[in-house]
Image: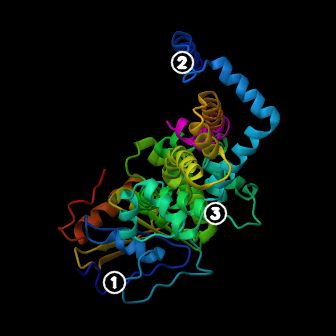
Amino acid sequence: MEVIRDLRLQLDAFSFGALIGPSGCGKTTILHIAAGLDADFTGERRIPGRGRLGMVFQEPRLLPWRTVADNLRLVLSPDESLGKLDGLIETLGLGAHLSHYPGELSLGLARRVAIARAFAVRPDFLLLDEPFVSLDVAVAARLREELTTLTQRERVTTLLVTHDLNDAIQLADKLFFLSTRPASVAVEMALPPPRGARSKATIDEIAGEVGARVPAYMPDVTRA
Amino acid sequence: MAKILSLAALLGLWALVAWLAQSPLLPSPLSVGEMVVVETRSGELPFQMTCTLARVRSKLIDRYADPWLVVLLNLPALVIIIFAYIWIGLNETAAIVAVALNKLPNVIVVTREGARSLDPALDDMAQAFRFTWQSKLRNVVLPQLAPYLAAVSRSGLSIIWKIVLVVELLGRPNGVGFVLGSSFSLFDMTRILSYAISFVALMLAIETFLVQPLERRTNRWRRNAA
């Protein structure tokens, strides 16, 4: 079954792209190819810089038998200590939870640990797979702020996969709308700066433009 | 506390039945206890237990093939032991091979089921973050196999002890099984029970002081789960 055809997805260095598409169109497949987890494709995959990848899965995928601190340590080099992540831990509010096991954490906290783990490797390329799904509004809002701060501070090229147009508009520099299978990029939209700090009026304006340009066969794309 | 009371009740019942029976076929707990003390002081009991322990610890299981697995699963332990002694000889190698072959299929089946249930999502995570194979084995694979390995270890230990005794009874010059065999030929119930109970006590000690603490330690993340 052909999932993707003639897909070309290019992000500027240190930019934040959002990949939006209907259910089953191949977003996860694209993400897996970008992460190097799926080699069953013809084409080219290029990661910027040293090729270091950080990934935040839709489920946190923390090791339940290791503490938060151990989950973070596992992605560090042997010569690196957890102290190196002090700034990251503070930004994400994880200081009080380092000795906890993932089973003791709320979903929001577990997602923040997963984000910390992704940034811990000092990635050149960050992949985010629906990081806000199933979170309540306040928790999701806080996580968006933290992601904006971190991606700007750490200067990481980022690709977000999401159903939520609001998340994409608030966080991204560029939107990529996928067609149905076999997926390709149907529409690309560059967004006006600054990302992460767009006013409601700007967001509404962008959403209006999306509504005009994006094909009608994307009922799963939501707008809160 | 419940375990202690239960064991005390068992001892009490044994003492009562032995007193009522007044037969050498069922000596009292006191006589058996005295025999344990005598055998321990002489060094005989520790020596025989050490021989048995060494055989259990020496066993390691590695190779299988599925049809062989099915055959071994269904072959009676006694038959395997006899085959080993006839084909390899009445020696330690045959004894260890017999024990290993008896336990091997169960270990393989349970471990295989554990391997089949490994979470592919964690595998993807390990791959995405470029875990080394050593780190993946230690941090991702083995913890998932731990419950299966614990189950097979616990059931395996209890089965192996029993098999080793039969191995020793049939063809070894020492060990608890050998002593039980020679005691049986003399109808020495006191000696039989003293060795059997010492054996059980040792297993209980291993369970209480080694297996359970290890199990509690490796499972503490489950107890802390929200």
Q: CA distance from mark 1 to mark 2?
A: 75 Å
Question: Which numbered marker is on residue A7?
Answer: 1
- Residue drawn at (80%, 39%) of the image: B43
Q: Earlier in the sequence, mark 2 or mark 3?
A: 2
Mark 2 lies on residue? B10
Q: Nearer the viewer, residue B223 or B110?
A: B110
Q: Amino acid at mark 3?
A: Asn
Same-chain check, marks 1 and 2: no
Same-chain check, marks 3 and 1: no
Q: CA distance from mark 3 to mark 1?
A: 69 Å
Q: Nearer the viewer, residue A210 or A201?
A: A210
In this picture, which residue range is highlighted in magenta? B205-226
- Residue drawn at (41%, 82%) of the image: A39
Q: Secondary structure at mark 3?
A: loop
Q: Quadrant of the N terminus of chain B?
A: top right
Residue B74 at x, y percent in the picture: 36, 57
